[in-house]
Image: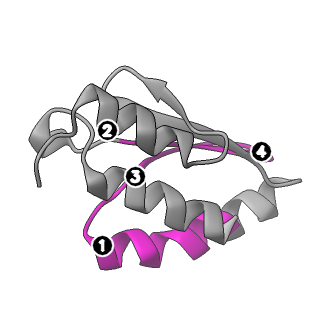
Amino acid sequence: MARLSEDEIDQGIEQLDGWSREGDAIEKAFELGDFMGSVGFIDALAPVAEELGHHPDLAVSWSTVTVTITSHSEGGLTAADLELAGLIDGIA
């Protein structure tokens, strides 16, 4: 999958709620209420990421899960990153 242009990235992020650009990645922190909410969120998003074959970086801090997405193989953001972000929003 081809790396997106800067304009495509900007347009894609505008379509996503609460995601921000962090270098060659997009990132969002999800507040899940408590540790079990965080674990449940990860349990719900893992099969979706696995099905896409596209795996985000996850950081867990009790009630917050920070999701970072990039396409390492392309050295930056692709349409798959934006697609995964949208699917993760649907899970949250």
Q: Position of residue 12 (x, y in %)?
A: 43, 44
Amino acid at circle 3: Leu
* Marks 1/3: CA–CA distance: 12 Å
Q: Is residue 48 magenta?
A: yes
Q: Is residue 58 left or right of residue 6?
A: right
Mark 3 or mark 2: which comes first in sequence?
2
**Which secondary structure, mark 1?**
helix
Q: Which residue is mark 2?
A: 8
* Marks 3/4: CA–CA distance: 26 Å
Q: Which residue is mark 3?
A: 82
* Marks 1/4: CA–CA distance: 27 Å
Q: Residue at x 53, y 69 (%)?
A: 45
Q: Position of residue 53 (x, y in %)?
A: 25, 69
Q: Nearer the viewer, residue 45 or 25?
A: 25
The image shows residue 48, relative to residue 36, as above or below, that is: below
Q: Nearer the viewer, mark 3 or mark 2?
A: 2
Amino acid at circle 4: Trp
Q: Nearer the viewer, mark 1 or mark 3?
A: 3
Q: Nearer the viewer, mark 2 or mark 1?
A: 2
Q: Which residue is mark 1?
A: 52
Region of the chain picked out in magenta, as a range: 41-69
Q: Nearer the viewer, mark 3 or mark 4?
A: 3
Mark 3 or mark 4: which comes first in sequence?
4
Mark 2 or mark 4: which comes first in sequence?
2
**Circle on res. 62:** 4
Mark 2 or mark 1: which comes first in sequence?
2
Amino acid at circle 2: Glu
Task: Identify the image quadrant of the N terminus.
Answer: bottom left
Dot 1 and dot 3 residues touching (CB under 8 Å): no
Q: Residue at x 28, y 53 (%)?
A: 79
* Marks 2/1: CA–CA distance: 21 Å
Dot 2 and dot 4 residues touching (CB under 8 Å): no
